[in-house]
Amino acid sequence: MTPVQLSAQDFVALGGARRAFLGWKKKLDTALFDQRRFTFAERFFEQWIDNGENLRRALDLAAPGTVGASELNKLQIWGDLELPPQGRFP
């Protein structure tokens, strides 16, 4: 099955709620625990939920000192990049 990339406008046109899906573009070696990815996820949720940043900004703020911009480019994002934290929709 080929994935379909949907934009925020696609979700609205289909009558769906604003949403986004994130995933790494390639298989990651998880044989060893990578503290950088753990810290990235922790900082992302801190920025997105605790600080109220939108999805794109939270990802950008979480990357420095953790996975960095080069790893962040390996993240595939579908949907609404301006997605606010759950419960903070306008």
Image (cartoon, helix red, strand yellow):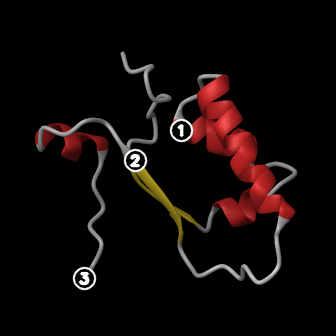
Q: Which mark is residue 20?
A: 2
The residue at the point 12 percent across, 40 percent down is: 13
Amino acid marked by disc 2: Ala
The alpha-carbon separation of the residues under discs 3 and 2 comes to 19 Å
Q: Are marks 2 and 1 in contact (CB under 8 Å)?
A: yes
Amino acid marked by disc 3: Met
Up-down: is 4 above or below 51?
Answer: below
Q: Position of residue 71 (x, y in %)?
A: 71, 65
At numbered mark 1, what does the secondary structure look like: helix, strand or loop? helix
Q: How many marks?
A: 3
Which of the pair 50/56 is nearer the observer?
Answer: 50
Q: Which quarter of the rendering shows the N terminus? A: bottom left
| Mark 1 or 3, nearer chain start | 3
Q: Are marks 1 and 3 in contact (CB under 8 Å)?
A: no
At numbered mark 3, what does the secondary structure look like: helix, strand or loop? loop
Q: Quadrant of residue 50?
A: top right
The alpha-carbon separation of the residues under discs 2 and 1 comes to 9 Å
Asked if residue 15 can be seen in this view, the reply is yes
Up-down: is 33 above or below 82?
Answer: below
Amino acid marked by disc 1: Leu
Answer with left or right where residue 31 lies relative to residue 28: right
Q: Position of residue 33 (x, y in %)?
A: 82, 72
The residue at the point 12 percent across, 38 percent down is: 15
Q: Which mark is residue 55?
A: 1
Up-down: is 43 above or below 26?
Answer: above
The residue at the point 51 percent across, 64 percent down is: 23
The residue at which mark 3 appears reads as: 1
Answer with left or right where residue 62 lies relative to residue 77: right
Using a 10 Å C-alpha cutoff, classify the residue at mark 2 as few (fewer than 14 neighbours), some (14 to 19) or many (20 or more).
Answer: some
Asked if residue 67 can be seen in this view, the reply is no
| Mark 3 or 2, nearer chain start | 3
